[in-house]
Structures are given as C-alpha cells and as structure tokens.
Image (tube, helix red, strand yellow):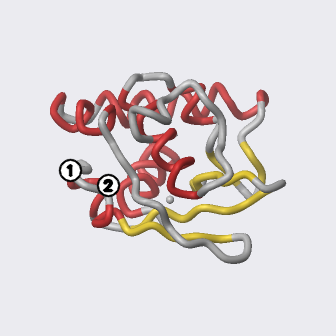
Amino acid sequence: MVAKLLTWSLTLSVIAALSLVGGSGKGPADEPGESLERMLVAMGNREYEDACRITVQDGAPVDDGDLDECVTTMRVFVEGLRPADVQALRQATVPDVPAEGKTAEIPGTRIPRIPPAFAEGAFELVRIDDLWYVVVTTS
C-alpha cells in the first residue's frame, strides 16, 4: 500500500499522470483539458469517486472493481495537501490543449495557480471511445 501511495503521489505530482463551469460530478470529457480540469476540481471537492472515474490505470478506465482502491489512495493523497492547495484544486482551470491521435500531455506549468506538487510534471491523458482520461500508474 505504501508503494502504491508513493506511486500515486509521484504520478499526481510528476505524472508520466476543471473549470468551475465544467465542475466536478461529471465523467470524462471529449477534450483532454476539460477531463483534467474535472478530475482536479473533483479532487479539490473531495469527490474522489468522480475523480477516479476520469482516470485510466493499466490501460483501462477505473471500474467498480478498482474504485475502492483508487478512492482510498486519492483520499490519502489529497488529505496530505495543504488547505490552500486543496482550495486551488477546486478552482483549477485547464486551458484548451490541441490533441491529435489518442494521447495528449498537459504540462502542470500551463495550469494557472496549480499547487506546486502538480506543476512539477506533466499530466498524460489518453482517448478511449472518444473520451479523455487522465493516466495514473499503479506500480
């Protein structure tokens, strides 16, 4: 569990891993930036199931069988953030990103006021059935 938590921390902060209009409570979107924004806002709102349903692990969207583990891991990660960083996630806005093919990468530095742990790397997204998911690794 500790190794997976560390991997999640690294994945979410350096990820090789939603405007308020988009809001949380929605699934993956048809644009990569919108999906990432939805996930970040859901994390900030502590809506972990919603955030997890926008992620891909091991090449497949998180399903009910993996949901509990994802929610637990994400909860531990978010609860370790400073309150100001959680607030910043709630207000995350991700700019439109041109995407061709089935993958997209969004540098954390392109997301205004994103917490430092998220700004250090890039978020990787993948298109599955015309919807975009944020890639997280579990190993």
Question: What's the mark number on residue 96?
Answer: none
- Residue on which the image places disc 1: 113
Q: Is residue 51 left or right of residue 80?
A: right
Residue in view at x 64 percent, y 25 percent: 68
Residue 123 location, x and y as percent?
Answer: 47, 62
Residue 25 location, x and y as percent?
Answer: 56, 24
Residue in view at x 58 percent, y 58 percent: 32
Q: Which residue is situated farthest in the front direction here?
A: 21
Crowdedness near tag 1: few (<14), some (14–19) or many (≥20) residues, C-alpha within 10 Å? some
Q: How many marks?
A: 2
Can you say whether 88 is above or below 113 in the image?
A: above
Q: Is residue 3 left or right of residue 35?
A: left
Can you say whether 77 is above or below 103 in the image?
A: above
Q: What element does badge 2 sit on?
A: helix
Crowdedness near tag 2: few (<14), some (14–19) or many (≥20) residues, C-alpha within 10 Å? many
Front residue of 30 and 51: 30
- Residue on which the image places disc 2: 118
Residue in view at x 47 percent, y 30 percent: 23
Looking at the rendered structure, the kind of residue marked 2 is Phe
